[in-house]
Amino acid sequence: MFAVVKTGGKQYRVAKDDVIRVEKLDAEAGDTVLLNEVLMISDENGAQTGTPMLPGAVVEAEVVEQTRNKKIIIFKKKRRQNYRRKRGHRQHVTVLRVIDIALDGSKKKATTKAKVAAAPAGDAAEEKATAKKATAKTAAKKTATKTTAKKATAKKAAAKKSDAE
């Protein structure tokens, strides 16, 4: 039995007792995470695919450790221009061991340590909407400050004209 799960913008083919390295998840070593974005499950009865996700399907995994990947070297060069740049980068990753694959996730009871990973895209949309609202408020405050400053300048100019007369 195996499943195809999506987490961190990537898809992974997992089976029971597999160890995979995924983009960093917010969990401590020893915690249990539930990967609820399951695209496909294949077992002895055949394969079941979702459109795009299988409703109720869950992959339960244990966090083995939080670590970093091997260093990636980024090297840029333009020939005959004496231009060379060398950079390195190590991505943070979470190492997971798959405990169980369930087609009906309602059977799974989340323990106190358990966290749901790979939250639905709705949460990200809410965060973006909140960020847009905050940006709009900031822009409105700046505009209000500018108009107040213009009014104050106009009043000063009018006061100077009346004093001059």
Image (tube, rainbow, N blue to C red):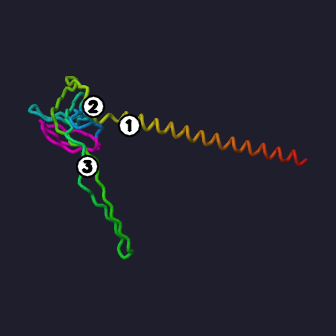
Q: Which residue is mark 2?
A: 115
What amino acid type is highlighted by mark number 1? Ala
User: Could you say where residue 41 lies in the image, as x and y percent from the top left?
Assistant: 17, 35
Image check: 138 left or right of 46? right
The span from disc 1 to disc 2 (Cα, nearest Å) is: 17 Å
What amino acid type is highlighted by mark number 3? Arg
Q: Secondary structure at mark 1?
A: helix
Residue 101 position (above or below residue 69): above
Where is residue 114, by image quadrant? top left
Does the stretch in magenta take in 9?
yes
Residue 82 position (above or below residue 140): below
> Which labelled disc corresponds to residue 68?
3
Q: Secondary structure at mark 2?
A: strand
Mark 1 vs mark 3: in front:
3
Q: Which residue is mark 1?
A: 124
What amino acid type is highlighted by mark number 2? Lys
